[in-house]
Amino acid sequence: MARIVQKFGGTSVGDVERIRKVADRVRRTRDEGHEVVVVVSARSGVTNELISRAKALNPNPNEREMDLLLAVGEQETIALTTMALHSLGIPAVSRTGAQAGILTDPAHTRARILEISGGDIDQQLKNGSVVIVAGFQGANVDGQTTTLGRGGSDLSAIAIAAALNADLCQIYTDVEGVFTADPRIVPDARKLDEIAYEEMLELASSGSKVMQTRAVKFAQKYGVRFEVRSSFNDKPGTIVKEEVVSMEDVAVSGVALDRNQVKIVISDIPDRPGTAARIFQALSEEGVLVDMIVQNLGREGRANLTFTVPEDDAFRAENAVKALKEDFPEAQISTYDRIAKLSAVGVGMRSHTGVAGKLFRALAEKKINVQMISTSEIKISVVIGIEDAEEAVRTLHAAFGLAEDSSKE
């Protein structure tokens, strides 16, 4: 008997019929003799609808009230899923994030998990019940409802698996696993049987929609091995685990595209120590996640600073920078909406040379202009025009031979 955490995303529980299918899958797992904890998201589209309603009433809604509102989506799903299991004769109980003992910091709409007690989940499992937990949410020390940000149900599932010492964590979604690129853009993209935490983390942070970045970080930190698989069939998915030597045989494992990035340029700022620190401190205080940064060489005591942020953070970023006008009265702020971040990822970059040269040569042959460059030990990212995004993905996928079976490379 194993203790298994199964997470189902919004499309997997999108309507009553799909919830029935989730309940049947859970039943089959339980009938095999396993203890099962199920973490669910809000039904597909519900969170966006709630946000839309809130902003129709107030363009800048209070974040505490937003958390109370958005938590409703997952609470609907846990109740419906529990009812579906009851209809199959399966004992089941639902638990909100707070009832599951998910304690967070006080940062509304983007809270971080401090600890998980599990509430009474362990006892319920020993009693033979399936426990259905609301993903994406928790409570702070004052008992206030908090949410974990977009994709937070992934984090809930991984964290609960760690807290309960689960034998397996399965992330059920609308794709069959982790692919070498988005199959909707690259038809011959190949599903990976396994991938290292580091690669999964870089792909997630580079625009892959399969997993939330924070969830992968949490899994790596606590050694939670998990599987990404489809909720619509029984095919094996992709195992995400510690790096193994064979993963280094291939220089690049995947190509990711992020079209939800905004580029901000602050021009004519003082070229002196402390200027960048002041700007990025202000962005940090507003909870803005800064990705790529480029500062040009200063001339005549002035410089330009360019950086990218997620589209969801653009409003806060602009407000934070504008608030610095008193410090930098001559600075000019420009925001460019339509950019894309393209990334090539692979732990094999550590032991392969020439990856950067091949990447830039492939883009140059297609006359795709590179605006910004960022690298890490296992990733090369570039900012390009949104109009070149899909062609660039296909170009790199072909250049690195990712459609081929890695055993033949």
Image (spheres, grey):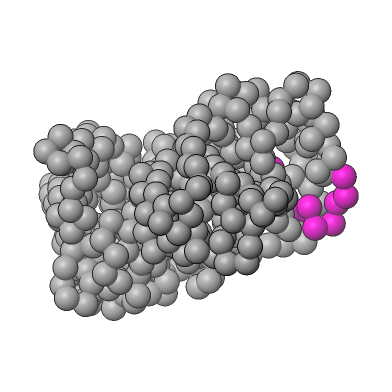
Residue 250, given in percent of the width and then of the height, sits at 79, 47
Which contiguous range is marked in magenta?
344-354
Residue at horizontal 50%, vertical 73%? 222
Camera-side residue of 397 and 279: 279
Q: Is residue 132 above or below residue 98?
A: above
Q: Is residue 351 magenta?
A: yes
The C terminus, quarter of image: top right
Residue 375 percent across, percent down from the top left: 71, 52
User: How many numbered circles are shown?
Assistant: 0
- Choose between 328 and 386: the one closer to the eye: 328
Residue at the image position 42 percent from the left and 41 percent from the top: 311
In x, y percent, where is residue 22?
29, 44
Residue 238 image point, x, y percent: 56, 48
Q: Check residue 248 for magenta coloring.
A: no
Against 144, residue 342 (above or below) is above
Residue at 33% in and 37% down: 11
Quadrant in which the N terminus appears: bottom left
Q: In the rendered view, does 301 fall on the left or right side of 52?
A: right
Q: Does residue 233 appear to the left or right of 178 in the view shown?
A: left
Q: Which quadrant holds residue 10?
A: top left
Residue 209 visible? The answer is: no
Viewer-proximal residue among 267 and 38 = 267
